[in-house]
Each structure stands twice: as C-alpha cells, then as structure tokens.
Amino acid sequence: MPAESLSFIFLNAALANNFVLALFLGLCPFLGVSGKLETAVPMGVATSFVMLVSSISAFGINWILTSLEIEFLRLISYIVVIASAVQLVEMVLKKFSPALFHSLGIFLPLITSNCAILGLALFQTFKEYNFMQSMAYALGAGAGFTLAIVLMAGLRERLALANLPTPAQGAAMSLMLGGLLSLVFMGFAGLGG
C-alpha cells in the first residue's frame, strides 16, 4: 500500500469520500436531526467523538484479533465498542446538558446503529492504516459528517422561511437538498482516491 499523508487522508475522508454525501452512510441522523442548527452541531460533534473512539478502539482490537488469528470476531467486537461509546456520550449529555439530550431524542442512541461509524472502523481496517492514519481518517470522517449535517441544517432553516408549494415541503425537499449537496461534493472527487 502506498503511504498516504495524514492531510490527504483527512481531506479525502472529509470531502472527496464524505461518508454522508459520497458514500451515503449515516443518512438517518443526516435527515432526522438536520432540521435546526442547534441540534445539528451537537449531533455532528457527538458522532465525531464516537467515530474517534471507535477508530482508536478498532485499531487496537484489530491488532489483538490479528495476532490471535481470530479475525472472525472483528465485526461483533466493533459493534460492542461503538455501542459502549454511544452509551458514554448519552450519559455525559444527560448529566451535563439535559435539554440537548432531549432535543436529540431517539437519534442519539441511534448513533449505535449509524452505519457510518461501523463503516469507518471496517474501512480503516481494510485499508490497513497505521494508528496515526486511523486517527486522521476518523477526524476527517467526523469533520465531513459534521460539515454535511450543518450544511443541511442551514439550508433547511433557510427554506423554512421560503414560500414553497405544499408538495415540495418536508421530506421531499430534504431529499432534494441532500441530492444537491451530494452533487456539490462530487466536485471533490478528483482530490481523493
């Protein structure tokens, strides 16, 4: 595998291969929590934190499983780590920001089943990234997720003030906006691999 610089890995994960807008992973919170900026930003930060913890843990777990030649336990191990990280985020938010905890609602525990996080752990394993490359990949993926959800929330807040015809409101407009954002991010495809 050719050595990739950390900045290349970060930008590739954040822009060219954005988990939401290029790989279409993590669409549930992207569409469900992007109605307001005040909930989109904390969801992006919470998801980024879980991605970082999951990436670090997945690197260590993969090293242990590979050395013991029991790689078949990789998937279940990653799921346990992701669920534990989400529980930690839930407990912290419930303790220090109950209003934010309630505003995120069901989407906070659903980070556990966010396929972007599991995809991150699996992709970094299959790409055989070292520890620093895994960190850069997780930070880039988290930044890309946060960027996507914040852009979507900003657009949806602006459109809430517009006079749209009734058939174009709600889920239909959200899906159209997501598609347009995805087209915009395709412009970064020349940067990545």
Image (cartoon, rainbow, N blue to C red):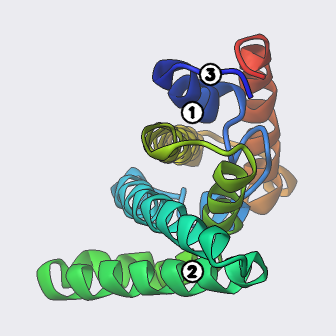
The answer to which quarter of the image holds residue 103 is bottom left
The residue that appears at 43% across and 55% down in the rendered structure is: 48
The numbered disc on residue 14 is 1
Instruction: Label 2: state its secondary structure.
Output: helix
**Residue 163 x/y as whole percent:** 66, 41
Q: Callout 3, which amino acid?
A: Ala
Residue 50 horizontal/vertical position (percent): 43, 66
Give the residue at mark 2. 112
Q: Nearer the viewer, mark 1 or mark 3?
A: 3
Q: Earlier in the sequence, mark 2 or mark 1?
A: 1
Question: Is residue 64 shown to the viewer in this render?
Answer: yes
Q: Residue 29, percent across and down?
A: 60, 66
Q: Earlier in the sequence, mark 1 or mark 3?
A: 3
Residue 186, disc: none
Image quarter in which the N terminus is found: top right
Q: Report the front residue among 16 and 10.
A: 10
Question: Tag 1: Cα neighbours inside 10 Å, few (<14), some, or many (≥20)?
Answer: many
Residue 84, quarter of picture: bottom left
Considering depth in this image, is 53 or 28 the residue closer to the camera?
53
For the residue marked with disc 1, what is the amino acid? Ala
Tell me: 163 left or right of 138. Answer: right
In the picture, the disc for residue 3 is 3
Position in image of residue 26 (x %, y %): 68, 61
Disc with the residue nearer the chain's start (2 vs 3): 3
